[in-house]
Image: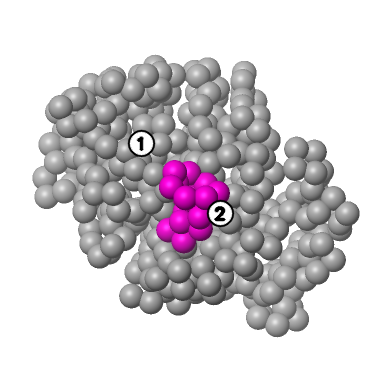
């Protein structure tokens, strides 16, 4: 299998062809979903010597028809650089848009994104690419290992699943929140010039403001009693799906309730409600994990209150899937042909590492009663969430053979 955007199957060949250029990179523009299908958010950085920034968006690849989008800039004292944010509005469905941005006195190449259909939704779900985590080799070899694994997964996942609308990443995009180099390498995968990413805050990111200067998240200004330095949870509507992204490092229950409540009130007609957060309340070994127990107390009661259909998470570095859970108990819902029909609670799915930066084992002697399926072969994984009509499906794949290891659907 050859990776057409540079992530060749052989790691050394990829390093020889790409690494020196990646090390010189100062970061790339990231898109994040807008408040709904008609908007797209952008964020990028420039040096402290260059506060001026521009963004052009149009439907012509030459950008002769482009509109200049308003850009807001603020100084990130933590990294001594400027962050620039912009939102393109009034976007139409099934349309390809082209854009370029001005940063550090230089115009970027022209990139593109395509808005999705109003009839269906397809999302790439990954977690814990965690650039800088691998524990073998020099500091540079660790970065090479993790970045290559991330490139390889993103290339395989996007080529195998055309028509993706955006990416959900459930935290730990980097190992060290203070490291601009790790952020730069994580952002550098070319697919993120074409697909927006909705990233949750991981336990390796919550303790500095650096996360919030890289992601221009929608609806992030909900008033809450407490939030981490990384910023706030947020939410957005895509077709008839309400996505709510929480910072599960926060142990103040009313913070999570405020965000979930604000999201449900803003989009009361959403058919589906999906939460994304870093820590899993019901992964395979959640019964013995202190943080999982805390999450059950501080967050999951509000899933029951507001009718959350699906919770996506990471952190555990192995794959697992729960039964349907409500009030901290497995419901009497029965899965038939990989499908739950009109379930009474929430389905929980926890992702394995998407880059191979780190794997954890599963203590199969102590798998919690809420967990239905678990899997670990120390191979990176990714999932695809698809929604069409009355069916929501999550299918999960290993990257070595691109083979499906699990699939589950909800019909309602």
Residue 140 has which mark? 2
> Residue 281's x, y, as percent?
34, 27
Seen as rendered, the residue at the extreme front is: 138
Where is residue 230 shown, x and y percent of the image? 63, 34
Label 2 crowd bin: few (<14), some (14–19), many (20+), radius 10 Å: few
Magenta stretch contains residue 154 = no
Identity of the residue drawn at 28% across and 43% down: 319
Q: Which of 64 and 171 is in front in this view?
A: 171
Please name the residue shown 36% across and 32% down the image: 280
- Name the one closer to the observer, 114 or 109: 109
Residue 343 image-quadrant placement: top left
- Residue 316 badge: 1
- Secondary structure found at label 2: helix
Residue 156 lies left or right of residue 184; in this view the side is: left
Classify the position of the N terminus by image quarter: bottom left
- Rendered residue at 24%/35% (across/down): 362
As measured in the structure, the alpha-carbon distance from the residue carrying label 2 to the one carrying label 1 is 25 Å
Q: Residues within 10 Å of mark 1 (few under 14, many from 20)?
A: many
Residue 43 seen by the camera: yes
Residue 393: give x, y in percent of width and height.
28, 52
Q: Is residue 78 above or below residue 251?
A: below
Residue 45's place in the image compared with 294, above or below, is: below
**Sequence-first disc among 2 and 1:** 2
User: Is there any visible trace of residue 391 in the rendered image?
Assistant: no
Q: Which mark is residue 358?
A: none
Residue 186 locus on image (x, y percent): 55, 54
Please provide the residue range marked out in magenta.
129-149
Q: Does the magenta stretch include residue 139?
A: yes
Quarter containing the C terminus? top left
Q: Which of 202 and 235 is in front in this view?
A: 202
């Amino acid at each position: 299998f050859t990776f057409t955007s540079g992530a060749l199957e052989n790691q050394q060949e990829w390093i020889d062809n790409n690494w020196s250029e990646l090390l010189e990179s100062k970061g790339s523009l990231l898109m994040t979903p807008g408040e709904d299908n008609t908007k797209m958010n952008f964020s990028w950085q420039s040096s402290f010597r260059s506060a001026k920034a521009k963004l052009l968006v149009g439907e012509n690849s030459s950008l002769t028809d482009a509109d200049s989008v308003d850009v807001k800039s603020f100084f990130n004292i933590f990294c001594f650089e400027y962050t620039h944010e912009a939102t393109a509005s009034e976007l139409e469905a099934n349309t390809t848009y082209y854009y370029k941005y001005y940063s550090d006195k230089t115009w970027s190449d022209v990139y593109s994104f395509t808005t999705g259909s109003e009839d269906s939704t397809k999302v790439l779900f990954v977690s814990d690419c965690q650039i800088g985590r691998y524990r073998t080799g020099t500091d540079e070899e660790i970065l090479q290992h993790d970045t290559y694994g991330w490139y390889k997964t993103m290339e395989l996942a996007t080529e195998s699943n055309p028509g993706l609308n955006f990416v959900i990443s459930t935290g730990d995009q980097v190992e060290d929140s203070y490291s601009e180099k790790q952020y730069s390498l994580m952002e550098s995968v070319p697919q993120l010039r074409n697909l927006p990413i909705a990233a949750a805050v991981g336990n390796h990111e919550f303790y500095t403001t650096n996360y919030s200067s890289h992601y221009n998240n929608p609806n992030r200004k909900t008033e809450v009693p407490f939030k981490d330095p990384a910023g706030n949870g947020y939410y957005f509507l895509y077709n008839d799906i309400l996505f709510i992204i929480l910072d599960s490092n926060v142990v103040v229950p009313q913070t999570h309730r405020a965000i979930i409540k604000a999201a449900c009130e803003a989009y009361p007609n959403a058919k589906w409600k999906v939460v994304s957060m870093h820590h899993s309340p019901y992964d395979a070994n959640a019964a013995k994990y202190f943080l999982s127990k805390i999450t059950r107390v501080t967050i999951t009661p509000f899933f029951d209150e507001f009718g959350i259909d699906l919770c996506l998470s990471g952190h555990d570095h192995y794959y697992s899937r729960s039964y349907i859970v409500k009030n901290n108990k497995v419901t009497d819902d029965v899965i038939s042909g990989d499908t739950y029909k009109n379930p009474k609670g929430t389905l929980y799915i926890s992702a394995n590492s998407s880059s191979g930066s780190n794997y954890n084992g599963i203590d199969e002697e102590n798998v919690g009663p809420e967990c239905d399926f678990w899997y670990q072969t120390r191979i990176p994984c990714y999932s695809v969430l698809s929604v069409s009509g009355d069916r929501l499906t999550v299918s999960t794949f290993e990257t070595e053979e691109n083979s499906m290891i699990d699939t589950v659907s909800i019909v309602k």
